[in-house]
Amino acid sequence: MSEATEHMEHAEHAQHAENKRIALLIAVLALFLSFSETLGKSAQTEAIDANVKMADTWSFFQAKDIRKTTLLTAADQTILLSSGLSDAAAKAAVEKQIATWRKTAERYESDPQTGTGRKELAVKAERYEKSQILSLTKYHHYELASAAFQIGIVLASATVITAMMPLAWLSGALGILGLFLMGLGLYAPHILPFLQAE
């Protein structure tokens, strides 16, 4: 009888040790889940910020385009309307105004000094767009990593209840997959084409 009791105590100690390992696995998965969630929120915020900046920059671009078109139209219309002017002083004043409008229209097209010309704004808006796409791509990686960690935690918890060790191994594999996806999100988000944001 004492041999059976020893055998049961040994089995209980083994189960207790196994549960400690599973609890440690759950804690590690939860730790990585918190990292993944934090990185995901950060990437999401960066994407929203880049989207707002991109929209603002394209709006500024369109405003410059409208102003440029208005000035060129006014210059062309003034040329037509002033063609019958015979007064030299009036003609010179009109030509001066037309030259001013055209110079301003050229500045609206490109102004490298201030960076607010249409060409410079287009480059800036495209840069924001690329930043937004990159942030969204990272976000997709982090979301999938979080899902892998969460499922891993559930499976590890089920291992404690059912004592089915294959669930623990699957949980560990999902943790490794989550780490892989999180690493890709951090260092190489463009490797997996099906996770690319558009």
Image (spheres, rainbow, N blue to C red):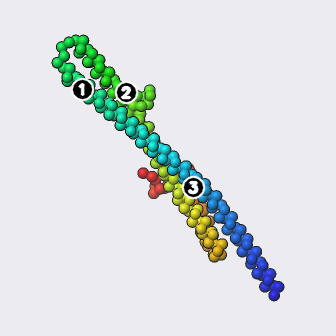
- Quadrant where the N terminus is found in the figure: bottom right
| Above-or-below relation of 17 to 176 | below
| Mark 3 residue element | helix
Residue 66 visible (yes or no): yes
Q: Residue at x 42, y 38 (%)?
A: 57
Q: Residue at x 35, y 25 (%)?
A: 104
Q: Disc 1 marks which residue?
A: 76
Q: Residue 29: percent from the left, percent from the top?
A: 63, 61
Please name whichever residue, 93 or 189, is drawn nearer the observer in this view of the structure. 93
Q: Quadrant of residue 150?
A: bottom right
Residue contact at pointers 3 and 1, CB within 8 angstroms: no
Q: Residue 27: percent from the left, percent from the top?
A: 66, 62
Q: Disc 3 marks which residue?
A: 37
Position of residue 172 in the picture relative to residue 5 (left or right): left
Q: Residue at x 59, y 68 (%)?
A: 154
Q: Residue 69: percent from the left, percent from the top?
A: 29, 32
Position of residue 91 in the picture relative to residue 161 (left or right): left
Position of residue 83 in the picture relative to residue 131 (left or right): left
Which circle's residue, 2 or 1, is located before the other in the chain? 1
Position of residue 24 in the picture relative to residue 184 (left or right): right
Residue 107 shows which numbered tag? 2
Residue positioned most to the top: 88
Q: CA distance from mark 2 to mark 3?
A: 46 Å
Residue 189 visible (yes or no): no
Amino acid at circle 3:
Glu
Amino acid at circle 1:
Asp
